[in-house]
Image (tube, rainbow, N blue to C red):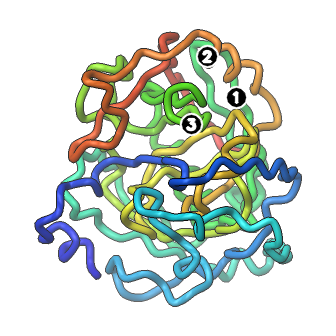
Amino acid sequence: MTDTDRRKQPAPRESTARRITPARGLGVRLGVGLGVLALAGGLTACSGGSNNATAASSPSASASAAPSSAGPSAAPSASASPTASAKPADLRKMTCEYRKDDTGSPAKFVGYPPKRLSAAVIKASTMTIKTNRGNIVIELATGDAPCTVNSFAFLARKNYFDNTVCHRLATMETNGLGLLQCGDPQAKGDGKNPTDGTGGPGYLFNDENLGPQYTRGVVFVAQPGDASNSNGSQFAISFTDENAQIPQAYTPFGIVKQGMDVVDKIVKGGVNTAKDGIDITSDDGGSNAPKLRVLIKDVTVR
């Protein structure tokens, strides 16, 4: 199905909201450590060729499940087989596909990332998010999610994230999971704006590296729960092992190596509940927001 076809369907416009929800009926806690992000999925989601939203014929595409409709079968697998991360020589041969987002989502378009990874991106090891609450340093898994890291590096160079806010704070008490979500350039992050959680960069790209569980410290891309291979600029930081219950439908691309104390302070500050209690489950968006306003001043990848 193309992005255009998806937009023409009579269903509500859920595809505009980058929502992450636990699988229904799951209460599992599989506290598996994520020192290594190289699990099933890997590089196969990157490809050259057609600019359409058809899922790539790869393990990554077939493994993704829609969180909004996932049943017990979507539980994270503790037996995913590790695969070797791509080496720099292999990354130089990669071709990434970024296609126009025609879903009608609000966008801040700064261009398309290059299809090939530059030497600087291949060598990059960290993504640093400078916020008004402190810095969060993420160790990147470029060998496992190269096209994802390439996209974030591109957006960082374009100052895309500067002066944006982290618009969503989901806690075990409010949502049954724990994550801080950022990357919507249009968001106000006050719990009142009904379209928070719908913005993106104006392009989409495919899933990668599906398989790792979203335990504490893992950073992954947020995308519509009803549409795989629809990644953009929004990302989430997990702050609890309870997120192991989230279906493996979101691309993990790094793990926080410094700054979890910053995230914990934001969480401790509490949640501004969205109007009418809607937290990215409506047609158009809306989200619970951190009471402590989180302003991203700058993002660097190096």
Which numbered circle lies on residue 136? Answer: 1
Point out the image quarter for the N terminus.
bottom left
- Say which label, 2 or 3, has the lower sequence index: 3
Query: Disc 2 to disc 1, how far (Cα)?
Result: 12 Å
Amino acid at pointer 1: Ile
Query: Disc 2 to disc 3, how far (Cα)?
Result: 17 Å
Q: Classify residue 149 as left or right of residue 264.
A: left
- Say which label, 1 or 3, has the lower sequence index: 1
Q: Position of residue 71 (x, y in %)?
A: 51, 64
* Residue receiving disc 2: 266
Query: Disc 1 to disc 3, how far (Cα)?
Result: 24 Å
Q: Classify residue 236 as left or right of residue 70.
A: right
* Residue receiving disc 3: 176
Amino acid at pointer 2: Ile
| Secondary structure beneath label 2 | helix
Q: Nearer the viewer, mark 1 or mark 3?
A: 3
Amino acid at pointer 3: Gly
| Secondary structure beneath label 3 | loop
Residue 14 vs 295, above or below: the answer is below
